[in-house]
Image (cartoon, helix red, strand yellow):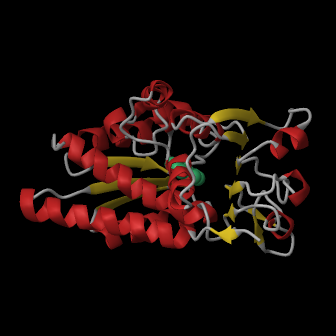
Amino acid sequence: MAQIIDGKAVSAAVKAEVAEETAKLRDEKGLKVGLAVVIVGNDPASRVYVNNKKKACEAVGFQSYEYALDESTTQEQLLDLVNVLNRDDRVNGILVQLPLPKHIDEKAVINAISPDKDVDAFHPINVGKIMIGEYSFLPCTPAGVMRLIESTGTDITGKQCVVIGRSNIVGKPQAMLLLQKNGTVTICHSKTKNLKEICLGADILVVAIGRANFVTGDMIKEGAVVIDVGMNRLDNGKLCGDVEFESAEKKASFITPVPGGVGPMTIAMLMKNTLTAAKQQAEIE
Ligand code: GUN
């Protein structure tokens, strides 16, 4: 039976580290850390995420600046705001909550954010830096996954790592991070043939395909570390991951639950990125 990886506890530990360093920067250097969060429209899920980000900022001692814009905001107005925030010295990190309304080109907005303030690490410059291993920020979810794997004491070097999902936000950067830790990495996706066979070879399996209960216990190698990035809502209102937990926990050595696994890590890593941004902008370290 697998040990359950407690994402809430690991997330709390990361936030405590950030809070401690933030207090030290304030006391010793007079430095304040600020995160601007921009939300456009009324998507209820986005509203919840943004509120959680604000709460996390308060908990670690950051200033948070929220910009809640109307659904009808034009792309030009949003780009103008991003440019103002790029120049605002109180703002160390800028996060524009996605998805944006359909009439706004997300790429144009991401590209407008100063790479130095891009705490999501979505800007092409930051994505490119991940490829060459010279990054300042890591995208929050894959960075959180790495921290969870680390919390199990698993050495990634030489391990067979399988990532299911190839999104720009999770799958692709996740594969790069596992590769940097000397894993042997395979990326699978919806068109992959013999997926079960590939999964059965995985010592570390990261699942981010966005399909409820997609990976079942019979696809998991005995003793594997299984990280479930999925967050799906079933018809009965319950949340579930991309991994069928009951059958998977019988095979894995470590497994993340949903909720309470990867989810809490994402915001913790966002706080960490914002602190890193503030230090870089103040030329500390
Ligand atoms: N929407 C869902 N997840 C994210 C995220 O990590 N960053 C941003 N900016 N928007 C999101």
State how many labels appear.
0
Relative image position of residue 191 (x, y in whole percent): 87, 32
- In the image, taking residue 255 as reference, residue 233 lies left or right, namely right
Residue 202 position by quadrant: top right
Quarter placement of the N terminus? bottom right
Q: Is residue 69 visible?
A: yes
**Quadrant (top left/top right/bottom left/bottom right) for the C terminus:** top left
Q: Residue at x 43, y 54 (%)?
A: 270
Rendered view: 195 above or below 215: above
Residue 199, image x, y percentages? 82, 44
Compared to residue 256, the image places residue 276 above or below, namely: above
Relative image position of residue 177 (x, y in whole percent): 53, 38
152 to 173, vertically: above or below: below
- Rendered image quadrant of residue 281: top left
Q: Is residue 240 left or right of residue 138?
A: right
The residue under the point 79% across, 37% down is 189
- Is residue 71 shown to the viewer in this render? no
For the point 81% across and 52% down, the residue is 221
> In the visual, does 257 lie left or right of 112?
right
Apparent side of residue 55 relative to residue 226 in the rendered image (left or right): left
